Amino acid sequence: MIRRLAPLALLATTAAAPPVVQDAAPAPAASPLLLNSADDARQVCGERVDVAKQLACVSWLNGAYQIATRFQSLGPQLFPDSCPPAGAATLGRQRELLLAWLAAHPGERASPALMAYRKAMAAAFPCTPA
Amino acid sequence: MKQLAALLLLIAAPAAAQPADNPVAMATGAHLQAICSNRDARDRRIICLSWLNGAAQGTGWFKPRDPAQTPAFCPPSLNFDLAAYRDIILAWLKQHPADLARPSIEVYSRALAARYPCKQR
């Protein structure tokens, strides 16, 4: 997913790496708080001390979950729908499921974070055909 | 950080059953307004922009189950700007105070659909 990086980049908690002499300036690394990749999700949602990262993880899950409850996927192979029973998908549970899925699928770390989230949720709460 | 206790509630309770007085739940338009209009508190900026980020990342990949409640929107570019989305939603709530009582995802969809309507084919 592409978006302007400025708003959340302001939230980055780590300083940029020291400059390195080279021919071309490297592109600035995107903050993991942007949750662009599954590996960002692993880093941010796996955080147990930094409250900023915990807030970012849970709030991102909250937004993604609210979309999932009201919108249907147009590309279920990439972004499958999920059907959790009422009350089963607390945000803490969603975080656990996402982290467990990422641990079980290390090859997916470069995938979009939302794709990993949707697959993790669908694996835990598959929709039964109508 | 003052939001820590509220965060713990958010993690433990079902997303659809958040206490009405816990704005970090981002469950209603009033929550969106309370959290996203505060530009000074870093924790609130994180909650607002991260919630918008989670909601917006799938733009173009999903269709509304009930377009009357959560209309589709078609931004000119998927190079979306979370701060612009925030401003659009806050302006919508200012103009439509009845939406403060609506679920936040409905407010999100209605505000962005009004700004970025999808052209009929």
Image (cartoon, rainbow, N blue to C red):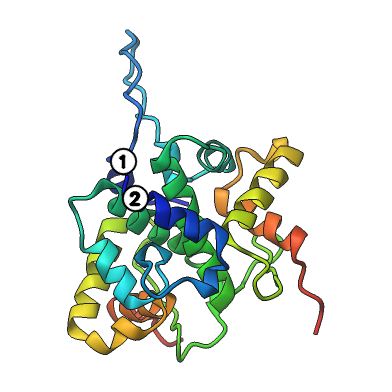
Q: Nearer the viewer, residue B78 or A100?
A: A100
Q: Chain of mark 1?
A: A
Q: Which residue is mark 1?
A: A11
**Cα gap from disc 2 to disc 1, whole angstroms:** 7 Å
- Using the rendered image of the protein, determine whether residue B79 is visible from the camera's viewpoint: yes
Looking at the rendered structure, the secondary structure element under dot 2 is helix
- Other-residue count near label 1 (Cα within 10 Å), few / some / many at <14 / 14–19 / ≥20: many
Q: Chain of mark 2?
A: B
State the residue lying farthest toward the front.
B5
Q: Are marks 2 and 1 in contact (CB under 8 Å)?
A: yes
Question: Is residue A17 depicted above or below B23 in this figure?
Answer: above
Query: Where is residue A120 shown, x and y percent of the image?
Result: 69, 54
Query: Where is residue B108 shown, x and y percent of the image?
Result: 37, 74
Question: Is residue A54 depicted above or below A83 in this figure?
Answer: above
Tell me the residue at 59%/54% (across/down): A92
State the residue lying farthest toward the right.
A129
- Using the rendered image of the protein, determine whether residue A67 is visible from the camera's viewpoint: no
Q: Which residue is mark 2?
A: B46
Query: Where is residue B104 shown, x and y percent of the image?
Result: 39, 75
Query: Where is residue A105 shown, x and y percent of the image?
Result: 74, 40
Mark 1 is on which residue type?
A: Leu
Position of B60 with respect to B20 (left or right) is right
Position of A70 with respect to B74 (left or right) is right
Report how many numbered discs are placed on residues in the image: 2
Tell me the residue at 52%/37% (across/down): A47
Position of A64 with respect to B95 (left or right) is right
Mark 2 is on which residue type?
A: Ile
